[in-house]
Structure formats: C-alpha cells, structure tokens
Image: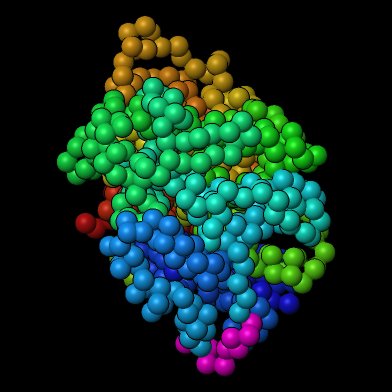
Amino acid sequence: MNILGISALYHDSAAAILVDGKIVAAAQEERFSRKKNDARFPKNAINYVLEEAGLTLDEVDYVGFYDKPFLKFERLLETYVAYAPFGFKSFCKAMPIWLREKLFLKNQLSNEFKNLSPDFDSKKLLFGEHHLSHAASAYYPSPFDEAAILTIDGVGEWATTTLSIGKGNEIDVVKEIHFPHSLGLLYSAFTYYLGFKVNGGEYKVMGLAPYGDPQYKELILEKLMDLKEDGSFRLNQKFFNYATGLTMTNKAFDDLFGMPVRKPDIDELTQFHMDVAASIQAVTEQVVLQLTGSIADQYDVKNLCLAGGVALNCVANGKILRQGAFDDVWIQPAAGDSGGALGVALAIWHKELQNIREVQFPDSMQGSYLGPHFGPQEIEDQLLECGAIFETALNDEVINCASDALSDGLVVGWFQGRTEFGPRALGNRSILGDPRSESMQKTLNIKVKFRESFRPFAPSVLREDVADWFDLDRDSPYMLFVANVRDDKCREMTPQESALFGIEKLNIKRSEIPAVTHVDYSARIQTVHRDSNAKYHELLEKFKEKTGCPVLVNTSFNVRGEPIVNSPADAYKCFMKTNMDVLICENYIIRKTNQSK
C-alpha cells in the first residue's frame, strides 16, 4: 500500500510518501524550487519522493491533502459576515482567488496530478482536517502508545488550538479553540509589529526576546487576551486586523504600546522592541504552560506530543519539560505546515484504513533525514559544472580535515547524506563553527548568514556528553528544546556587564562556549546520536579529542532569504558567496583559497 501526502497552496508546500506504513521520504518544495516557504503545488517534491520510493504516481493507492478547503471557505465567509461592513477591501481581494482557485481545490489538484500522470484517478484524492494532519504527524511517529496531542498554530479551517488523545492507531479530538482566537496569530501579530515577516520571522522574535525585559506582559494579558486558568483564551479583536483586514494589527494596537509598526528598512531595533519581544514570548510561555498543566490534570495520560507552528517555539518547549507535568514530550521536527503532508498520509494509513501501529524507539522519523541524497558521481558532476576545484579524501581524512579546520577557527560547510525534513539543519546541511570562539557568533551572522547580529546559534553536542555541558539529560535530536548552559561552564558577568542593555550584551563572554550561549545563558540543543548520524557523531568525537569540547556550532546551510541547500550545486553556490572557508560534500573537500574568483 502506497500513500502520498501533500501540503500546498498556503505556505510551506511539501510531499511525503509511505510504503506499507513506513516513512520512505519527505521533502519541502522550497528545497527544489529555491523559493523560501514556497507555497505552490509541490511537483518537484512529489517527483522526488516517488523516485525515492521507486514508484510512479499510478502506483500510489491514496493521495492525501492536509486540510479541507470548504471548511476554510466557510470560516472566511462567516468571518466577513460577522465583521461587516469592516473588511470589505480584504473581502474583495480574497473572494476572486477563492472563487477562481481555492474553492475548487479538488479540481485544481486533480489537474495538477494529471499533468504529472494523465491517467491519475481523482477518486484517490482524500482530504484531512488541518489540525488532525498536524496531530497525526506528531503522534504516529512518536515513541508513545498513548499520548495527549497539543496542536497550536495560526489557524487551520476553524481550529487554532486542538487537544487530541492518541491511543493505539486512533486519534480523537477532544477540545478546540477556534478562530479568531489564536496564540499563533497573536505571536504573528507581534512579529508584524516588530517589523519582521509573518510566517517566517517569528523565530526572530524568539531570538530577540532574551535581550529585553517583559514589562508589557501584564498589558497584553489585561488588554489583548482573556486568559483562563486552564490555558484557554479569547483575544480582544479591537486591537487586531487579521480577521478581515490586510494587516495584522491596527492603530489601536499602536496606541496601546505607544509606537507605530517598525519599518524594518528604516527603523533600528531599540530596547522598546526587545522588551515587546520579551513580553509576547513570556505570554506565549504562560499560555502554553497553563494549557499543558491543565491537560495533565484533566487526562490520565503520561506523554505529550506537540505540532503546529507554535511547537517550533523551543524556549516554551524547554519550559514544558521543566514543568514536569508529563513523563515525556515528543515534537514533530517538521511541526509547521510542511509536516501536514506527512500527517495526512499517516492518518489515512492508521485512522482511515485501521492499520495496526507499531511503536518504534526513539521514533519512526529516522532522524528526519528523509530528503534527497547524492552519490559520488552526481556530486563530482555538479561540482565540475560549477567550476569547483576540489580534492577527494577517505572518510578518516575528511573527519580530520573538518575537525582541524574547526579547531583552527575556520567556518565549514558540511554537506552529507540525506536532506533534513523540516526547518532545522540537523548535521547534514549545516554550517559549522567552533563554539569556544568569542567572535564566531558575529562572524557567522554578519559574514556568512548575512542576517541580524542578535540571532543566536544552536549547539550540536554528543548525546553522551550533553549533561556535562547543559542542564539537560535527555535526547534532543531535532533541536526543539532550550536549556541553560551548566553553571560550571558559565562565567558570571560583572555588575557593569549586567547593567548593559539589549545588543550591548552580545559581545560579553558568558561561558566556555560563547558562540552558542545566548544572552540569558540558554541554548537550543541538538543531541547527536551515533545510530542516526554516524559521520556527524564521528566529527564531534574527533573535535572533542582535539579540543576537549564535544560541542559544535550548527546553523542551517543557507543565507538570509534562501532555503537550506539541497544539492551539491546549491551548496557550492552558497559557499562561494559567503565567507565560509571550507566546504565538504561527502568525501569531496573544497577550500576557498583554491577557488578561482
């Protein structure tokens, strides 16, 4: 039985394929099209996953789409009616697109599939509900035979927050919060207000928050949100414009905070913006912790699964762990809409077709290494076509070359194995650096990634050594939990340093690994496991042997505004337009000093 799942036409299009219930491949369309957050029909991703599975489209038994457009259209119409006559301009802009395209999505999707295979049978096409697709993506690959499943995002059809209970092969939705009351949209509203791009810049708000003080937290809870003890909430729509307008916030919102929306190309980030970021992050954490606490109190379930865009808020995830309401927590690494492609396929296999679920440990995501891989000849051909000057090496030589370069303070592009599925680089499409360097964070942000200087970097650490360096002693393979650097690895700031504000704190050395220690002494941790990524594990072991440090800086192999690299050609082009020093594609070594400019 072959099941293809897709997400498309809103944002983060993706495709995933199951063969007899096993996840064979999954990938985002952006990796092929090179258009960040590409929302178009994922024809390239579909072709890839079919090829990886050795299938044609005609051999697929079911095709699942991750949400139900008719329910979404119902929500759109009812919202405009409820707010009329406000939102008429937005209504006039949205309706032609819906009437021309999205309302008849089944026909559109059928036509797209017939372009791939003229004999495609549209009866194979099934539609899942948005939040059920998210829940399925989190629960079915998890290592739990029973779990509470919390899905939080902007909005699906109607739901914005959903609690489900997973048991065996069943998922039952038990509670929902509906649009326009949305924690995801609240966070996105602040993303917009701070001058960052909605559905893309939310992680910048999370990164900016530790530079500020949450002095507006109570204002948000008093004026914008009615938060109940169990974590349920309602938002005061007087201050928002997202329900029917063309912006996220309005003048009343500006007046409440005393400042207009920041213009990113004109207005500098100030302490005010940092304090606002800290405030919405604090509110988000409080809501999530009240939700998870009340779920644990109400339901006799020991494990928690998370999905939806808010599940990528790794600071909140870390606090859920420390809250201790559940024995264990598992989060889908592709927690956003791309993961819905996998979720709908899994829901068809388990929930609709009633196939038995076999729980796998640590999970069935295979480290999330589910994307394309390239053989030696493919790599060599692409590098030659790009004009690259390279050398080949045996595996031991590659590990020695990379560890030597890193311990010398050089920046290494690391391209190995299969592309990661989801927004995180987990050691196969990574830019690596020495975490002990006091200048590495600034070098990577300004000279390599070409992005804001305040952005933090994540540490990859050997799983066996994580508890010696961080306040964490558990698996965190998907970089989805934040914990503090251990006190004995930290340096206490002087009173003068502690008195600094905002970005002034950036250049203060706070630990033995300053390049991955955020201003609040936290880090977004990836544990590296020998059984899921042997080569990356070997590199960390060799770096530890040479330096005594089992940690590397790991950031995604891309520059600002571009998707993570997919192919060797993508990697070389990115390498050449940055100040990276060495690129290693499998067993091919490319040194910047040898390249013709």
Name the residue located 43 percent from the left edge and 19 percent from the top edge.
510
Name the residue located 65 percent from the left edge and 55 percent from the top edge.
135
Horizontal arrangement in the rendering, residue 279 relative to residue 545 (left or right):
left
Horizontal arrangement in the rendering, residue 250 relative to residue 519 (left or right):
left
- Relative to 253, is 357 above or below? below
Horizontal arrangement in the rendering, residue 567 relative to residue 196 (left or right):
right
Q: Of 321 and 222, which appears nearest the observer?
A: 222
What stretch of residues is rendered in magenta? 115-124
Quarter in which the N terminus is drawn: bottom right
- Relative to 521, is 301 above or below? below
Horizontal arrangement in the rendering, residue 213 relative to residue 421 (left or right):
left
Quarter in which the C terminus is drawn: bottom left
Q: Is there any visible trace of residue 116 in the rendered image?
A: no
Q: Of 536 and 312, which appears nearest the observer?
A: 312
Residue 586 at what x, y percent from top left? 50, 57
* Residue occupying the far left of the picture: 266
Magenta span contains residue 38: no
Q: Quadrant location of residue 57?
A: bottom right
Q: Of 110 and 159, which appears nearest the observer?
A: 159
Name the residue located 36 percent from the left edge and 71 percent from the top edge.
95
Residue 12 at what x, y percent from top left? 46, 61
Residue 362 at what x, y percent from top left? 72, 47
Residue 463 at what x, y percent from top left? 64, 36
Name the residue located 43 percent from the left edge and 57 percent from the top edge.
82
Numbered disc total: 0
Q: Is there any visible trace of residue 499 in the rendered image?
A: yes
* Residue occupying the far top of the picture: 495
Q: Quadrant location of residue 545?
A: top right
Q: Of 358 and 465, which appears nearest the observer?
A: 358
